[in-house]
Amino acid sequence: MSAVYLDHNATAPIRPEALAAASEAMIAGGNPSSVHAAGRASRARMEQARTEVAELIAAPASTVIFTSGGTEANALAVESAVATGSRRLILSAIEHDAVLETARASGAQVELMPVDGSGQADLAWLTARLAAWDAADGRPFVALMLANNETGVIQPVAEAAVLVRQAEGWLHVDAVQAAGRIAIDSRALGADTLAISSHKIGGPPGAGALAFGPRATLVRRLHGGGQERGRRAGTENVPAIAGFGAAAAQARAELASAADQAAWRDAAERTLIAAGAVVMGQGAPRLPNTLCFAGPGFPAELQVMTLDLAGVMVSAGSACSSGKVKASRVLDAMGQTELAGAAIRVSGGWSTKPEDWKQMVEAWITAYDRHAARRRAPAA
Ligand code: PLP
């Protein structure tokens, strides 16, 4: 049986088009700031990638700043807001650590916007909170991700944008997981800043982007040269950026096949539920590629290891960078504290086939039944 990789939300396998573009750029070399022919060619590659990335999120290319990844793109937005006078930051309770920890480290006050049981942000709470805003806290800053990395639940970003705009605030949207999986129009969404990342869409790791609108003022985080219109110093990672551009173009072309991804996921979900699994965020709109579910009584770590032995690679609901599993604060925020330690995340993508989902389901049901039988067996 061949290995099955269903962990695209961690890192998607590199797309052949991205690999080709990245290696061509690496072989060609050149510094995009140099004025000679090699420099100009390097700049041309980078600007082509900027256009491709901008098209994926329907933003003007001139508003896209390349960064080292999603983490840095989020940090650029959060730190710019604080540097320009936001003293209190409202984050949805399910934001990625890249947003949460940057906000906590920024020196500003951090407040969490609750989510409901299906994992969607509570906009009634946001309405009330913004209505009671204290001018001493500066410009309201709200971070609401477009789709959650663990559950895939899509957030009501356009509705939140209306509220934030009325309050003359800044809405930051972490679209790292949504990009390439659902169509994104950053202007129609009303995002003031929007972050995406290359390695989640089949591009190389080490590249990301922040798109910014006219109501966001970005500050310099890295000092040195005048790269990225003076907003992000340092010689650009042109090979990764070229690969990011190629991946973005390919992902955009494949958005139409999202319905297939969703159909395979939904079929897997039905079989798993029948076998005793509990699906997280089932009642909410979700990314077509993501399935987060719990096997009651079956620790997530054990599920991941057992599936791995069966050749199926997935993540625990919340895997931190050390590889250790900690209780998921996303599922906790959804009121699923009891099941949080038993939840895993399965995520497909461009390289996924329907058989992959079937193999995962079979392996999981076998493992779950075996674990349940062992728990039922009287101790010797
Ligand atoms: N935001 C979300 C929602 C993510 O899922 C991730 C990665 O897991 C990041 C940000 C960080 O992106 P990167 O790994 O490119 O720094």
Image: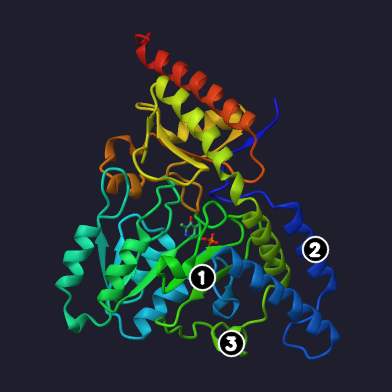
Q: Residue at x 77, y 63 (%)?
A: 21
Indicate which disc, 1 or 2, sits on the residue closer to the N terminus: 2
Camera-side residue: 307 or 135? 135
Q: Would you identify the image quadrant in which residue 374 lies?
A: top left
Q: Secondary structure at mark 2?
A: helix
**40 relative to 321 in the view: left or right:** right
| Residue bearing the label numbered 2 | 23
Residue at 40% x, 17% y is: 372
Q: Quadrant of residue 92?
A: bottom left
In three-dimensional space, the C-alpha distance between marks 1 and 2, rounded to whole angstroms, equals: 24 Å
- Mark 1, Cα crowd under 10 Å, few <14 / some 14-19 / many 20+, is many
Looking at the image, tell me whether mark 3 or mark 1 is earlier in sequence order.
Answer: 1
Q: Nearer the viewer, mark 3 or mark 1?
A: 3
Query: Which numbered dot is residue 160?
Result: none
CB under 8 Å between discs 3 and 1? no
Tag 3 residue: 229
Amino acid type assigned to the residue bearing label 2 in the image: Ser
Residue nearer the viewer, 159 or 311: 159
Residue type (three-letter) at the residue carrying disc 1 = Glu
Respond yes or no on whether mark 1 lies under 8 Å from ligand 1: yes
What percent of the width, then of the height, locates residue 327?
A: 36, 44
For label 1, the residue is 72
Give the x, y percent position of residue 368. 45, 21
Q: Amino acid at mark 3?
A: Arg
